[in-house]
Amino acid sequence: MIDQDIHKGLAGVVVDYTAVSKVNPETNSLLYRGYPVQELAAQCSFEEVAYLLWHGELPDGGQLAEFESLERSLRGLDDNVKRVINDLPLTAHPMDVVRTAVSVIGANDPDAADSSPESNLTKSIALLAKLPAIVAYDQRRRRGQDIVEPRDDLGYSANFLHMTFGDVPDLVVVNAFDVSMILYAEHSFNASTFTARVITSTLADLYSAVVGAIGALKGPLHGGANEAVMHTFDEIGSADRVEAWLDAALAEKRKIMGFGHRVYKNGDSRVPTMKTALDTLAAEFDAGGLVELYEALEAAMQERKNIKPNLDYPSGPAYSLIGYDTEMFTPLFVASRVTGWTAHIMEQLQSNTLIRPLSLYNGPDERHVPASEKN
């Protein structure tokens, strides 16, 4: 066997340049196009952040108004997309519904094969606009509720919540949801983004790349972790049961979801911002017990394993307080991360090379099929 290093999971391997985002090791801050994400979450709307990821700069007033007008005009779902969603069984995971709906949208687009920057930007805005309708529709049909059509007089997050719950919640809820969308929007060459770039490198269309990214995000080691966090909270029940639960979980060598991150060495820089949003929701809904459980498990994991939480840890309980069913959490991630995925798809095409790594074979040496005996 050739003496060669193997980088399992591509850990530590730099495969390309990107101008979309980075983690600044000096400040431990995630930067979108150079801006710390915590500053964007504090001062910008999700629409402004989406524009930033796609264009490289924050919009001025006129640019934002034009962008918002276009996005709001594209929010509705075609009847054939609704029919496909309705035909899917309620036993299907919501991520399967989102993946299928995006595929249908792509199949219906006569310009799907047009990968020009202008066409791909139009597709990206359309997916941003329609994904909330898909996610909201799926939760409502699972609850036996009628669809709520989008409104063009509401911002992205307010409209998302309106379509899901039938009314516009208090501003504290809208703001917390908007913060979560900003924090989830982009994170460099994570598993789903890299999947999208690999597919794009073959010169497949944008929809194919997004569908592949959705598949990658479904896994519990990536986007599905926010669902797993809520399952953990449900299993523990209350703060006073954390120590006993963690003893048993560690003895069984279970992976505690919502903790640790390959990129961050000093804790996920997005967590404090999302924890603040969670605290505002807990105060709004009188859910102090949930926060006590959260903080007890966080402290126990720090003491036992010296591992800090990642963004999925505060976002899961935040989405639960807002009213989303646990299985809808990862589709919410999709609705946000589609901005980052498509930014990377367009960046990949600017200087494309087919992504085709090598592997080191460790199977049997060359051998030959025995000659058969014929009468």
Image (cartoon, rainbow, N blue to C red):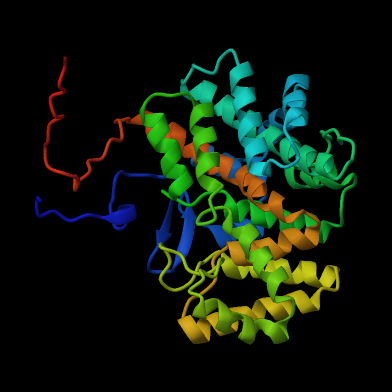
Give percent across and percent down for residue 202: 36, 26
Up/down of 259 relative to 200, above or below:
below
Asked whether residue 48 is in view, the answer is: no
**Is 22 on the left-hand or right-hand side of 319?**
left
Give percent across and percent down for residue 130: 70, 32
Extreme residue in the left direction? 2
**Is 280 on the left-hand or right-hand side of 42?**
right
Give percent across and percent down for residue 303: 51, 87
**Is 162 on the left-hand or right-hand side of 38?**
right
Up/down of 314 relative to 306, above or below:
above
What residue sits 72% from the left and 42% below the top? 91
Task: State the residue in front, 55 or 62.
Answer: 55
**Is 111 on the left-hand or right-hand side of 3?**
right
Give percent across and percent down for residue 133: 75, 36
Up/down of 48 relative to 223, above or below:
above
Q: In which quarter of the image is the C terminus?
A: top left
Extreme residue in the front direction? 375
What residue sits 66% from the left and 56% below the top? 180
Q: In which quarter of the image is residue 355?
A: top left
Up/down of 164 relative to 348, above or below:
below
Count of labels in the image: 0
Asked whether residue 331 is in view, the answer is: yes
Task: State the residue in front, 57 or 339.
Answer: 339
What residue sits 69% from the left and 34% below the top? 129
Q: Quadrant of residue 145?
A: top right
